[in-house]
């Protein structure tokens, strides 16, 4: 929701980045304020996933120009873990399996790292269990997923829900959801969307990167941006997504 | 010091006691040792493993035995276990705890020479006629553990060998014989621990005889001192319908070798061999296993993992022989390895010899590094790169540790591994 008195959370100016010597981002501009929901749409190869990985600090991507500030801090001066501790969260397009690390251990260790950063008490395993059993309701997951290895043997939908569970536990200020809707059936999509909606407040913000409009039926964006050729070529309200759904991307590419 | 001088010095070890039927075996073993000598560098079973650090020393027998208190070995203890403690190869009554040993024979080997079961099996299984280290042990061992199980023993049996620091390099010869009667069940922990950071050579031999329908979990921990040398040999026979479940963990020693030979003696026996070597610095850890499927419908499942950091060198050789007549054999072997530095290296060599049709055999080996995607994922959740690496390394090791059925040991080993990883990163 667009609020009066909201603060600028993320400000990206003329961002350029490449991977393996190939230029992908060619000047991205974006401002996200607290309380807002943004959607970044675009065809495959438009740079939208690269954009989310660059913001999170993926080591394969090199920033070659432009700036990004997160709550006034230079984002690119921070290591990925420092960005996470500052309140940035990336829900992965392809969640990673980690055999041998239980979901609950991962969540607790990550949670305590952030608590430490914020100068708050760490929770022991028993205290943490109470917290996580509350949070897991957000994504309608069974508690037995907590004792299993992270994402190991999870279905595609379960992995995506698990990402949102991490978001629920870590309570980021800015969550970037990288194609969180891909590979979800309609029930899983509804659960994931409900989960994200329940986590939205006036003090945090969400950027959804998506190919399709259907997620936006459930998580209604304040802004829709269209990426093409490594730039944001058009910005509008939620009606822009509906127009894209009806007309495809070609008309924007032609106009741009 | 030369290889030959090192060998000859070992032959000068403490003369064995003239102890009845054992005397003949000891004499014969010494002759075999002399004839065999140390393996040549080109010996097929030893070609990956550089023993030259061992040959730099002349090892002497231990002339007196350290008086230790329970507090000195507390960090190695397993709560509620039947405990047999050897200090520098010598049985220590005071540190042992046999209060839970009702219904099972857990004793000093040399104090039990009159036991006909002991005599029937001792030195009948280990291949001392083919291997100089095993022969040297068979001649020079001071004492050892004699375990004879009937029925079901709930408490884990902990055989703890501790070695103290001396002002000269010492040679220790731990020995163990386990015989399990039909339908018996037990958990046995064979534990080699260095108390201080001394230079010593621990040359261990274990024989395990499982009669029909026995279930044994046999845990082997090698946590010797960092400048120590450890060469261990274990021969196992598994009877009909039995389950031999081995978990070996190698953490210590400058150079270590564990050779495990398992013979499927009866039909429908099952063998699970799980191993973990976690090494860093200049450590060398070698695991050689040999499984003989000699009877029908046997099953073996093996998973060996090695994690090497620094300029450490891991060696795994796993041979499986399916003999004629071993129809219906089902065998699976996997060697998975993790390299944590550019200088570390791992040689892995699965070998299958199938002399029979109608068998299922699978094997595979991988050598990899920490998964970059997993590392980035953890960093994106707030973990520092060092702690993310530690967590992933620990997770890789945890799969083996988790197979240990003694919870306190799982916990201790998990902590040890996490601390080791932490230390290595600082």
Image (cartoon, rainbow, N blue to C red):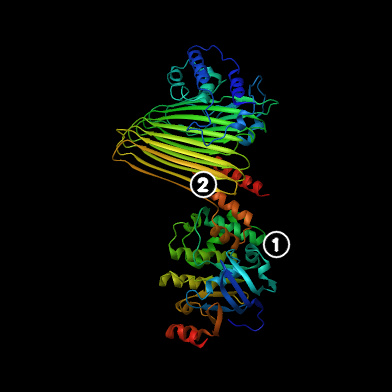
| Residue receiving disc 1 | A119
Residue occupying the point 59% across, 35% down:
B255
Q: Which chain does the numbered disc 1 sit on?
A: A
Mark 1 or mark 2: which is in front? Answer: 2
Check the image and report above or below for B232 versus B361: above
Residue depicted at x 42% and y 85%: A246
- The percent coordinates of residue A187 (x first, y second) are 42, 71
Q: CA distance from mark 1 to mark 2?
A: 39 Å
On-image quarter of the N terminus of chain B: top right
Residue lying farthest bottom? A255
Give the vertical position of B101 relative to A82 (above or below).
Answer: above
With respect to residue B14, does B292 lie above or below? below
Residue B238 pos. (x, y %): 39, 31
Name the residue located 56 percent from the left edge and 15 percent from the top edge: B16
Q: Secondary structure at mark 1?
A: loop
In front here: A48 or A121? A48
Secondary structure category for the residue under label 2: strand
């Amino acid at each position: 929701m667009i609020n009066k008195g909201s603060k600028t959370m993320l400000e990206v100016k003329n961002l350029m980045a490449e991977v393996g010597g190939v230029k992908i981002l060619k000047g991205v501009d974006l401002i996200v304020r607290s309380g807002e929901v943004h959607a970044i749409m675009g065809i495959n190869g438009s740079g939208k996933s690269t954009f989310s990985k660059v913001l999170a600090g993926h080591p394969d991507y090199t920033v070659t120009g432009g700036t990004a500030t997160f709550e006034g801090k230079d984002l690119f001066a921070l290591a990925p873990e420092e960005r996470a501790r500052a309140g940035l969260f990336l829900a992965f397009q392809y969640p990673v399996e980690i055999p041998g690390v239980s979901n609950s251990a991962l969540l607790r260790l990550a949670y305590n790292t952030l608590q430490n950063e914020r100068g708050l008490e760490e929770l022991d395993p028993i205290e943490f269990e109470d917290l996580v059993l509350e949070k897991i309701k957000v994504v309608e997951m069974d508690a037995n997923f907590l004792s299993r290895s992270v994402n190991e043997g999870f279905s595609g939908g379960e992995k995506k829900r698990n990402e949102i569970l991490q978001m629920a536990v870590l309570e980021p200020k800015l969550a970037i959801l990288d194609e969180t809707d891909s590979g979800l059936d309609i029930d899983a999509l509804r659960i994931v969307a409900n989960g994200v909606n329940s986590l939205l407040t006036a003090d945090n913000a969400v950027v959804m990167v998506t190919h399709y409009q259907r997620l936006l039926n459930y998580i209604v964006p304040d802004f829709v941006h269209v990426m093409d050729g490594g730039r944001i070529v058009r910005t509008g309200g939620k009606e822009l997504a509906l127009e894209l759904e009806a007309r495809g991307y070609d008309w924007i590419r032609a106009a741009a | 010091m030369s290889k030959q001088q090192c060998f000859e010095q070992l032959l000068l070890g403490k003369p064995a006691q003239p102890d009845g039927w054992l005397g003949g075996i000891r004499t014969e073993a010494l002759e075999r040792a002399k004839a065999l000598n140390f393996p040549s560098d080109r010996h097929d079973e030893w070609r990956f493993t550089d023993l030259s650090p061992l040959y730099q020393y002349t090892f002497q027998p231990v002339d007196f035995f350290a008086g230790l208190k329970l507090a000195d070995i507390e960090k190695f203890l397993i709560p509620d276990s039947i405990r047999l403690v050897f200090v520098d190869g010598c049985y220590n009554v005071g540190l042992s705890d046999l209060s839970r040993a009702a219904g099972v024979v857990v004793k000093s080997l040399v104090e039990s020479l009159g036991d006909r079961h002991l005599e029937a099996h001792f030195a009948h299984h280990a291949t001392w006629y083919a291997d100089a280290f095993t022969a040297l042990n068979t001649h020079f061992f001071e004492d050892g553990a004699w375990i004879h199980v009937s029925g079901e023993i709930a408490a884990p049996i902990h055989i703890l060998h501790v070695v103290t620091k001396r002002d000269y390099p010492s040679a220790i010869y731990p020995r163990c014989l386990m015989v399990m009667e039909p339908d018996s069940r037990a958990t046995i922990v064979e534990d080699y621990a260095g108390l201080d950071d001394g230079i010593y050579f621990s040359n261990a031999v274990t024989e395990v005889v499982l009669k029909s329908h026995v279930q044994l979990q046999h845990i082997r921990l090698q946590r010797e001192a960092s400048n120590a040398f450890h060469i261990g040999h274990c021969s196992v026979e598994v009877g009909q319908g039995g389950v031999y479940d081995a978990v070996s963990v190698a953490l210590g020693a400058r150079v270590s070798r564990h050779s495990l030979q398992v013979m499927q003696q009866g039909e429908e026996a099952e063998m699970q061999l799980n191993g973990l070597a976690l090494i860093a610095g200049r450590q060398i850890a070698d695991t050689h296993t040999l499984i003989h499927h000699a009877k029908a419908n046997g099953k073996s499942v093996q998973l060996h993992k090695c994690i090497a950091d620094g300029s450490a060198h891991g060696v795994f050789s796993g041979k499986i022989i399916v003999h004629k007549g071993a129809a219906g054999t089902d065998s699976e072997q996997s060697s998975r390895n993790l390299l944590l530095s550019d200088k570390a290296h791992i040689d892995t060599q699965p070998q299958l010899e199938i002399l029979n049709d109608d068998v299922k055999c699978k094997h595979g080996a991988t050598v990899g590094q920490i998964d970059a995607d997993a590392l980035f994922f953890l960093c994106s959740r707030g973990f520092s790169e060092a702690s993310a690496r530690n967590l992933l390394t620990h997770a890789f090791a945890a799969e083996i540790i988790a197979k240990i059925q003694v919870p306190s040991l799982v916990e201790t080993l998990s902590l040890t591994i996490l601390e080791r990883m932490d230390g290595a990163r600082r």
